[in-house]
């Protein structure tokens, strides 16, 4: 499941219109071109979302087997290792600057969920989740993943 801010922005702009807000057209002082007020509002809201969250999208994945994450977006993984050991390999650290990945072991089995990276995770090659509801949250600085909780 992805939570995309485009849906939120559409809903917010529609609510403003329903409340009687009108979006005027502005003239670009440099080019003289018309700038649509609604598009200007949408652009501002999108920039705010990027500033607040680092990216427009946040993925929620439920996994039951070894997986390499490939998307360069904030991601939460609910990992069910009841079927066997599993490894979650993080995306390239360079593609994830300022973005977070959260991995939670959801099952009560004795199977380990290993979170790994081609880079370091807080100085280690991997991080192991061994207990139900154990969580690790990492953020990338472009050269390594840092555990934040």
Image (tube, rainbow, N blue to C red):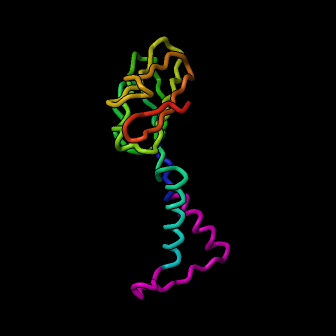
Residue situated in front as seen by the camera: 145 or 47: 145
- Residue in the picture at 50% in, 73% down: 40
Which span is picked out in magenta? Answer: 7-35
Residue occupying the far right of the picture: 19
- Residue in the picture at 53% in, 24% down: 106
Q: Is residue 41 above or below residue 78?
A: below
From the viewer's perspective, tell me whether residue 54 is left or right of residue 31.
Answer: right
Percent x, y of residue 19: 67, 73
Residue situated in front as seen by the camera: 38 or 50: 50
Percent x, y of residue 7: 52, 58
Q: Is residue 108 above or below residue 101?
A: above
Q: Is residue 120 above or below residue 112?
A: below
- Residue in the picture at 44% in, 16% down: 112
Q: Is residue 14 above or below residue 33?
A: above
Count the numbered circles shown: 0
Where residue 24 sits, quadrant-wise, is bottom right
Residue situated in front as seen by the camera: 31 or 113: 31
Residue situated in front as seen by the camera: 98 or 111: 98
Residue occupying the far top of the picture: 110
Residue occupying the far bottom of the picture: 32
Percent x, y of residue 127: 44, 22
Residue 28 magenta-highlighted: yes
- Residue in the picture at 38% in, 26% down: 116
Question: In which quadrant of the rendered image does the C terminus lie?
Answer: top right
Residue 149 magenta-highlighted: no
Percent x, y of residue 82: 46, 17
């Amino acid at each position: 499941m992805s939570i995309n801010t485009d849906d939120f922005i559409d809903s917010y702009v529609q609510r403003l219109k329903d409340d009687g807000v009108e979006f005027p057209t502005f003239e670009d002082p440099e080019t003289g071109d018309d700038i649509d007020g609604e598009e200007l509002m949408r652009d501002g809201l999108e920039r705010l979302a990027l500033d607040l969250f680092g990216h427009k999208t946040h993925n929620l994945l439920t996994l039951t087997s070894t997986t390499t994450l490939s998307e360069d977006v904030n991601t939460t993984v609910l990992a069910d290792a009841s079927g066997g050991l599993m490894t979650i390999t993080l995306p390239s650290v360079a593609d994830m600057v300022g973005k977070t990945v959260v991995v939670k072991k959801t099952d009560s089995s004795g199977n380990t969920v290993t979170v790994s990276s081609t880079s370091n995770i807080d100085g280690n090659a991997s991080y192991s989740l061994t207990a139900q509801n154990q969580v690790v949250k990492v953020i990338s600085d472009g050269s390594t993943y840092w555990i934040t909780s």
